[in-house]
Image (tube, rainbow, N blue to C red):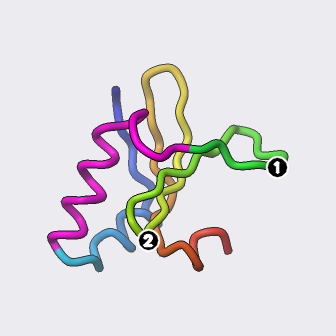
Amino acid sequence: MRFYYSKTFEKKFSKYDQKLQKKIFDAIQALPEGDVKQMVGNNIPVIYRLRVSKYRILFQMKSGEVKILKVDTRGDIYK
């Protein structure tokens, strides 16, 4: 599986400490395993949510490619 990261994700990810970065990175590498749910609504293309403790990662999946869009805390990710 091939992973692409948005600038929004990279900027926020770089601010986290190394321990949290490793936890998030490991969860991303294990996709589609983990607590993954499809977002509800008229999202075209389809957006999925991955839960890693109190953080959420939004991403899109299609034919062997995963684009990581955002990472943030539960309260701020959906804004």
Q: What residue do we see at 68% from left, 39% from top?
A: 46
Snapshot quadrant of residue 71: bottom left
Direction right: furthest residue = 42
37 lies above or below 20: above
Amino acid type, residue under disc 1 in the picture: Gly
Give left or right: position of 11 versus 38. left
Q: What residue do we see at 70% from left, 38% from top?
A: 45
Give left or right: position of 63 versus 37. left
The residue singled out by tag 1 in the image is 41
Of residues 12 and 74, the one nearer the viewer is 74
Query: Quarter of the image containing the N terminus?
Result: top left
Of residues 15 and 34, the one nearer the viewer is 34
Residue 60 placed where, x, y %?
Answer: 55, 41
User: Answer yes or no: do the residues labelled 2 and 1 have beta carbons within 8 Å?
Assistant: no
Helix, strand or loop at label 1? It is loop
The residue singled out by tag 2 in the image is 54
Residue 7 placed where, x, y %?
Answer: 43, 62
Does the magenta portion include 42? no
Helix, strand or loop at label 2? It is loop
Direction left: furthest residue = 18
